[in-house]
Structure formats: structure tokens, C-alpha cells
Amino acid sequence: MRELDVFSTAQCVKVNPDSPQKQVRFLTLSDGKKLLTPQPRLRTGFFSVIESNMLTSGTIKEACTSVGVAKYGRPIGLDEKIKVDLIVIGSVAVDPKTGARLGKGESDSGGIACKIAKRTKVQGFAELEYGMLRYMGAIDDSTLVVTSVHDCQLVDDIPVEKLLIHDVPVDIICTPTQVIFTHTSIPKPQGW
């Protein structure tokens, strides 16, 4: 991830709060960037911003955890003016030829996220978060989406024709052994 030009030039990176992306959150803060991460389960707000310049080298590791986000992060709402340069999301499976991905599809876990998901028919948190960022004006079609997965999560049979208008495709796939630029032609969601 660190070798990607888009990562090295990014000033603000949105990274999901799941365990597999903990290292990406660590790299983001260690490299002096602003980290935007969703509130856990979106129950107490929408996003938290962690400013790397407010941390010491000893607190960066803690700031990458859900406890650390609550301790060091500043909650923000949908009216916050922020520009996100790069989005990093997790995937259950991803097609390297098309950039189509499958997430966990768990936006039915409760709280405000559940209410928004039911109203918009969005199935996963990554899609819900993407829609909120579009609504905020924090991202646009040119904002690259990266997924970090294991090589065994690469599949070549996700049917693009089954994707819905809110499904988020990925531009770049990072695995432990390779970086894949998908050159996806799947349109990115436009938000609400």
C-alpha cells in the first residue's frame, strides 16, 4: 500500500474499521496523514477524524483500534467539509478483471445505519459510507477505491450484471503478493 503513488500523495485516507485494515490505518497515521474512519457500527455518529499531528509515536498504534478512535478521534457529521483523497475498504471477494467486489453486507446490525440502509436499500457498510461521503462532497468519481485482501480472495466470477447502482467497485487491489490495477468500467455510485 505504501508504495502506491495515490497513497503517498494522499493527505486524507478513509479506511474501514475492520481488523484486516488495521495495518492500513497504522500506515496512514505513521505517514503523517489524516485518517477518516467510520464510527464503530455507525451507532454514535458517522465518521471520526484522527489527525496524525495530534498523536505521538507511542499513541499511533492505539489510535488504530476502535478504542483508540473513540479516544483520539473527533466525531464529524454529514455537514463537515472534508476532502478524502483515497478510500480503502475490505472485501470478502474481489474480481481483478472487473473490480467488482463482495462485502460482508451487514448494514442490518442496528442503529442509525440500519435506518438509512433500509430507506436506501443499501446492503453493506462500505456502500453506505461511500454514499455518505458522496453526499458530503468529500469524494467524487475520481476518488480511487482500494481494497486490501489476501490472494485467496481473488475470484473471476462475480457477475457484473448482478451489481446494483450502490455497489462500490474497486480501482486497485492490494494483496500480500501483488498490486492489481483493475481499470474498472463499473460506474461508481453517485450517492443520495
Image: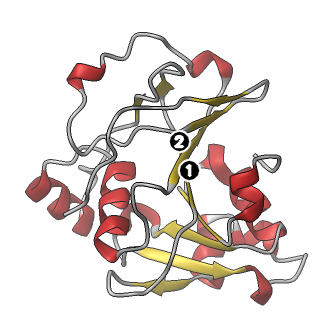
Instruction: Tell which residue pokes out farthest to the top in this image.
Output: 157
Q: Amino acid at mark 2?
A: Gly
Q: Are marks 1 and 2 in contact (CB under 8 Å)?
A: yes
Q: Quadrant of residue 7?
A: bottom right
Q: Earlier in the sequence, mark 1 or mark 2?
A: 1
Task: Name the spot of residue 40 as percent of width and height, x first.
Answer: 46, 65
- The Cα–Cα distance between marks 1 and 2, rounded to whole angstroms, is 8 Å
Mark 1: which amino acid?
Asp
Nearest the viewer among 21 and 13 is: 13
Q: Residues within 10 Å of mark 1 (few under 14, many from 20)?
A: some
Of the numbered discs in the image, which one, if any, rests on residue 18? 1
> Which residue is disc 2 drawn over?
90
In the rendered image, residue 67, in percent from the top left (x then y), is placed at: 62, 71
**Disc 1, SS:** loop
- Residue 38 at x, y = what percent? 46, 66
Mark 2 element type: loop
Q: Residue at x 28, y 52 (%)?
A: 109
Residue 70 numbered mark, or none:
none
> In the shown orientation, is residue 19 left or right of residue 189?
right
Q: Residue at x 19, y 55 (%)?
A: 117
